[in-house]
């Protein structure tokens, strides 16, 4: 009889303890912050249709911090070619903004600072560092975005070119993007963008892309895309010290393997 009572008491105490722990777990508030990271291997670094690694591979990665209010900030980096971006040892992008979803629409505004450590146009003291403001809206799988340079656009000014055209702040990029999941884990991508370089219109161009990505468990993703531009071949052809020349705006394939944590 005592054994039965002891067992009953044990069951009762165990139940009370489980209920108490469960209540404590329910009362523990979820963190309002979300942290994520990503790292990837790309066949080359392509920015707005232009190759900045001279068709050589790029390792890229970054961190993002988001608050439930919609505020976010992040940092991202990649290697670059010091032929495409004189003397630069890499690119670091620092950004922050606010995103808000209303029904099927998501609105996004923010600032993006491009930093190129060591990057300096040969023969000048002009840096490539550029600050842009951006605003975008996404409806389901369609996105429109506008970016505007608040500083000179990647070092374009009289000191760099000696053309008497002035500065290039106010240059802008407008783009349309489509990302449609046509099968579970499979997403079709399409993009078109127009880069206008203020006071240096001969460097302006249109770029476009078509591709597909496949997502896997564990945050893995592979992708393939075809990219092209109408950038002036003469202006966008760069030669390294070995006289190896590359039209950085020519059509190209981009393959990548990426993981998000």
Image: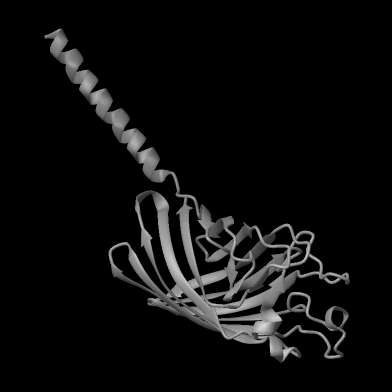
Of residues 50 and 98, which is closer to you in this image?
A: 50
* Count of all numbered marks drawn on residues in the image: 0
Residue 25 placement: quadrant: top left
Q: Residue furthest front?
A: 243
Above or below for 76 versus 100: above
Of residues 57 and 193, which is closer to you in this image?
A: 57
Residue 45 placement: quadrant: bottom right
Residue 23 left/right relative to 166: left
Above or below for 108 versus 164: above
Q: Could you tell me residue 140's position as x and y percent?
A: 38, 76
Could you tell me which residue is drawn at 28 percent across and 30 percent down? 16
Q: Residue furthest top?
A: 2
Could you tell me which residue is drawn at 23 percent across and 25 percent down? 12
Residue 253 left/right relative to 116: left
Residue 110 left/right relative to 200: left
Q: Quadrant of the N terminus?
A: top left
Q: Could you tell me residue 55's position as x and y percent?
A: 59, 65
**Would residue 108 be visible to someone looking at this image?**
yes
Residue 74 placement: quadrant: bottom right
Could you tell me which residue is drawn at 73 percent across and 68 percent down? 243
Q: Could you tell me residue 94's position as x and y percent?
A: 66, 62
Q: Could you tell me residue 211's position as x and y percent?
A: 41, 72
**Would residue 194 be visible to someone looking at this image?**
no
Above or below for 209 versus 4: below
Q: Residue furthest left?
A: 1
């Amino acid at each position: 009889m005592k054994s039965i009572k002891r067992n009953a008491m044990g069951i009762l105490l165990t139940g009370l303890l489980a209920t108490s722990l469960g209540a404590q777990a329910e009362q523990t508030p979820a963190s309002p912050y979300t942290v994520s990271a990503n790292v990837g291997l790309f066949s080359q670094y392509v920015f707005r249709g232009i190759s900045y690694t001279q068709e050589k591979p790029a390792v890229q990665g970054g961190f993002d911090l988001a608050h439930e209010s919609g505020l976010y900030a992040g940092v991202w980096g990649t290697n670059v070619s010091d032929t495409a971006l004189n003397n630069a040892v890499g690119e670091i992008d620092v950004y922050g903004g606010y995103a808000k979803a209303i029904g099927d629409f998501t609105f996004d505004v923010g600032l993006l600072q491009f930093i190129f450590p060591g990057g300096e146009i040969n023969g000048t003291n002009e840096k490539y560092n550029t600050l842009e403001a951006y605003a975008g809206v996404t409806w389901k799988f369609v996105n429109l975005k506008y970016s505007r340079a608040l500083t000179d656009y990647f070092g374009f000014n009289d000191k760099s070119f000696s053309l008497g055209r002035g500065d290039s702040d106010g240059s802008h990029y407008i783009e349309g993007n489509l990302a449609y999941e046509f099968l579970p884990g499979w997403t079709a991508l399409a993009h078109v963008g127009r880069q206008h370089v203020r006071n240096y219109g001969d460097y302006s161009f249109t770029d476009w892309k078509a591709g597909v990505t496949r997502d896997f468990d564990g945050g893995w993703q592979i992708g393939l895309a075809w990219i092209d531009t109408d950038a002036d071949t003469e202006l966008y052809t760069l030669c390294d010290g070995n006289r190896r020349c590359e039209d950085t705006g020519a059509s190209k394939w981009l393959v990548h393997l990426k993981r998000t944590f």
